[in-house]
Amino acid sequence: MPIDAYSSIDELARALRAKEVSSVELTRFFLDRLAKYGERLGAVVTITRERAMREAEAADRAIASGNVQNKPLIGIPYGVKDLLAAKGAPTTWGAEPFRNQVFDYDATVVERLTNAGAVLVAKLAMVELAGGFGYNNADASFTGPARTPWNMNFWSGGSSSGPGAAVAAGLVPFAIGSETSGSILTPSAFSGVTGLRPTYGAVSRYGAMALCWTLDKIGPMARSAADCNTIYGAIVGEDPRDPTTARVFPSGRANWVASSVQSRPANKRAARIGLVKGSWDKTQPAVRDNFLAAVEVLRAQGHTIKEIDYPDFPYGPVISLIVDAEGASAFEDILQDGRAKQLRALADRTGGYAAAATLAIDYLRAQRIRPKIRQALLKLFEEVDLVVSPTRSTVAYPIGPNFDEVYKDARSGPAVIPSMNLLGAPAIALPNGTGENGLPTSIQFNAAPANEMLAVNTGIHYQFVTKFHLQRPPGFD
Amino acid sequence: MAKTSRRRFLAVAGAAAFSTGAPGSQPGDVIRRAESPSLQCLPYTQHLAPEEVERIRKDFADAVPYLESFRKFRLANADEPDFTFHSLTERW
């Protein structure tokens, strides 16, 4: 059977179980694509060929013996952002000082995907240290800038830059990214893929690089909301090795999450959608137009739409101080011994030192304001089920100039991404069209903590009608 | 996206840090604080060239206005930070 690089997880799973294709064939196919396009896109750090073939052979044996219960991803290749430990493979955190780092264990997420039958084919590029030292340019990884396949002169977004580019170009069927504040949603938007930022504490961070203990989250990036849902079901749930996961999604809930994709038509219900006032009127025109067109789709699907005033808080300073203080502490070793000066981006070489000057009293002030933010945003979620806005106010940034030198006329309005990360709320980013230079635009649905299923299901229904998630970048067939 | 980067917000915080303990300084008085920054609180400066230290100092000073809303946010004595210490725990 000819393999389509852009198949959904459901399609691949059906073909594998029907033995129309083997996992070994599928794995070889994606390994070849990674080898062919990975470097051009700046998307790949390490191709895990040996491990992949071993896991693919095991998957084929399991399929042949019919032993595929509780293995929703059996035989399906995937990649992970290179901040997740995978036994024996380099885990570089995108940064020169760590390019030879190797762990002798798998991160919980990798372990769970292995248990679900998935095949790890690549460690994918990322912005160095997940952007913790304040990078201001796309060239902020020791592997160079990752490119969006929609236009190779533009960045794929960060800090999960490799997952964005690799999924968008069909180098892997899905990938795992991470977000502290925007690092799943932004590359999903810039690369035209669907990304799910889970509730804080829903997915174990064991074996993941720590940037910011009170904000880091790990989640899927894939072709569709339905795919994200399937992947999420395999990785969500309590892990004794990560105390933040306690009681957020007990394992029973995880099963429900995983099974919900099977019953999605029955799950359809009208949501109360709140559009964040001021979030689209100063964006790039195509971002605005595509956003308003998406809103009309949601309205036609029976959802209640209203505009909402976003609570006014100093979201930017609060999240900055938290990331800076925790990030400087997490990487104090390389600040202390001077290895931070080996980082790629100019801003990163001094950014960590500046961050280390954050006063304890400022960090605590930020953490004391945070409950007020939570209270205000949870109150908002009493009025609406989903808080919706454009994911980004612009299309992808060009490679070369600093971020603050471009798109000077566009503004996002209220800081939805930082505020929802401070809350620990889940969100899904969905492609909703194209804008300048043929680059994708995106819409985000945010839900109250532990309500990702509402965001995901609304996304699945949205993608029943719109087909933006099925579009393919030119030149990567 | 707002044009103020996360780094600029950081820089603002640092500006306040530099002048901690300045005579007569008041909570929220960030502009006055930033007028005479020192670099006493910047650690590991042995790894920074003088021009890098100067750049950080300038970033801190430039970014002062962006911290205004943060500094002005009123907190009461009873407002606890968003994490809790547990003396007893079953797990850890």
Image (cartoon, grey):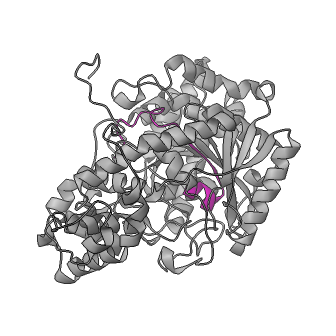
- From the image, which quarter does the N terminus of chain A lie in? top right
> Is residue A316 positioned above or below A138 on the image?
above
* Residue A220: x %, y % from top left: 55, 42
Q: Verify whether residue A203 appears in magenta.
A: yes
Give the residue at x 22% y 22%: B87
Residue A11 place in picture, x, y as percent? 72, 37
- Determine whether B36 is above or below A360 in the image: below
Q: Nearer the viewer, residue A469 or A45?
A: A469
**Residue at image location 32% in from the left, 61% down from the top:** A95
Q: Is residue A239 visible?
A: yes
- Quarter of image, res A78: top right
x and y, in percent, of residue A36 in the image: 55, 62
Locate the C terminus of chain A by quadrant.
Answer: bottom right
Asked whether A347 or A439 is in front, the reply is: A347
Left or right placement of residue A37 versus residue B44 in this view? right
**Residue A255 in the image: x percent, y percent?**
58, 20
Give residue A132's quadrant in the image: bottom left
Q: Is residue A143 magenta?
A: no
Task: Identify the magenta region.
Answer: A186-209
- Foreground: A448 or A213? A448
Q: Nearer the viewer, residue A365 or A134?
A: A365
Residue furthest toward the bottom?
B51
Seen at 48% across and 32% down, the residue is: A202
Asked whether, in this view, residue A259 is left or right of residue A237, the answer is right
Total marks placed: 0
- Residue reaching furthest front? B24
